[in-house]
C-alpha cells in the first residue's frame, strides 16, 4: 500500500483501516489535521473468506495477521531497529507456536496431508528466520516487498492449504 499518511495519535476509528476504505476514512479524519495526526493503514485484514471454520485456528490466524499489521505499521512509522526487531521476534515466535498447534491436531487426527502441510510450514519458518537473522545483522531492512511476501504467503497458505483440513478438524470435534 503506498501513499500512506501516518501518525500515532488517531482515534481508533481512523486506525487499522481496510485499505479499500482509505479515501473515505481520510475524509472522515481530516478534521484532525491541525494536530498533525495522520493515518495508519493495515496491510492485511482477516475476513470470513479466510475462515477455516475452526474458531481456535481462526483466532490464531487473526493474531498472526495482527502481528503482520504491527510490523507494517512499524515500518511506515519508521520505528527504530530495536522496536522492529522485537516485532519480528514476536511474529517469528507466534508463527512457530501457531504452526505447532495445527500440526498437533493434524497428527492427533491422523490427517493425510500432514507431511506436505508441515513442509510448507517449515519453508515459511525458514524464510522468516532468515529475514530475522539478516535484519538483526543489519544486512536487510524492512521493506514493502517483505511485507507483501508475508501477507501473500499467509493468505495463500490459509486459503489453499489450511482450508483442506477444515472438515477433518470439525469431524474430530474442533
Ligand atoms: Fe497451516
Image: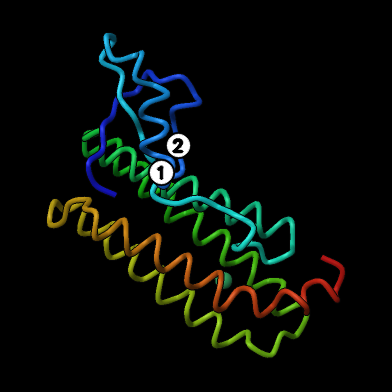
Give SS at disc 1. Answer: loop
Compare residues 33 and 81 and report the one nearer the observer.
33
Say if 17 sits above or below 51 in the image: above
Q: What residue is drawn where x is 41% and y is 68%?
A: 153
Instruction: Say which quarter of the image contains residue 74.
Output: top left
Q: Is residue 156 left or right of residue 141?
A: right
Instruction: Please state the horizontal and vertical placement of residue 34, each as a whole percent of the image.
Output: 27, 9
The residue at the point 44 percent across, 27 percent down is 14
Whether the residues at callouts 1 and 2 have beta carbons within 8 Å, the answer is yes
At x 22% / y 39%, what residue is drawn?
81
What residue is disc 2 on? 16
- Residue displayed at 49% across by 59% down: 95
Could you tell me residue 136's position as x and y percent? Answer: 22, 50
Q: Decide: is 4 above or below 154.
A: above
Q: Reading the chain from its start, which is encountered first: label 1 or label 2?
A: 2
- Quarter that holds the C terminus: bottom right
Residue neighbourhood size for the residue with mark 2, other residues' Cα within 10 Å, grouped as few (<14), some (14–19), many (≥20): some
Write down the residue under mark 1: 42
Amino acid at each position: 500500500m503506498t501513499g500512506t499518511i501516518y501518525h500515532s495519535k488517531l482515534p481508533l476509528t481512523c486506525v487499522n483501516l481496510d485499505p479499500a476504505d482509505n479515501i473515505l476514512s481520510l475524509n472522515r479524519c481530516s478534521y484532525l489535521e491541525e494536530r498533525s495526526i495522520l493515518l495508519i493503514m493495515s496491510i492485511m485484514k482477516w475476513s470470513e473468506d479466510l475462515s477455516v471454520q475452526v474458531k481456535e485456528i481462526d483466532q490464531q490466524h487473526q493474531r498472526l495477521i495482527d502481528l503482520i499489521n504491527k510490523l507494517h505499521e512499524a515500518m511506515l512509522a519508521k520505528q527504530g531497529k530495536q522496536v522492529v526487531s522485537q516485532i519480528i521476534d514476536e511474529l517469528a515466535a507466534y508463527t512457530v507456536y501457531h504452526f505447532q498447534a495445527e500440526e498437533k491436531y493434524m497428527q492427533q487426527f491422523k490427517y493425510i496431508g500432514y507431511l506436505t502441510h508441515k513442509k510448507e510450514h517449515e519453508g515459511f519458518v525458514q524464510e522468516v528466520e532468515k529475514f530475522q537473522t539478516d535484519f538483526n545483522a543489519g544486512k536487510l531492512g524492512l521493506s514493502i516487498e517483505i511485507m507483501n511476501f508475508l501477507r501473500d504467503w499467509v493468505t495463500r497458505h490459509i486459503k489453499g492449504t489450511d482450508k483442506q483440513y477444515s472438515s477433518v478438524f470439525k469431524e474430530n470435534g474442533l
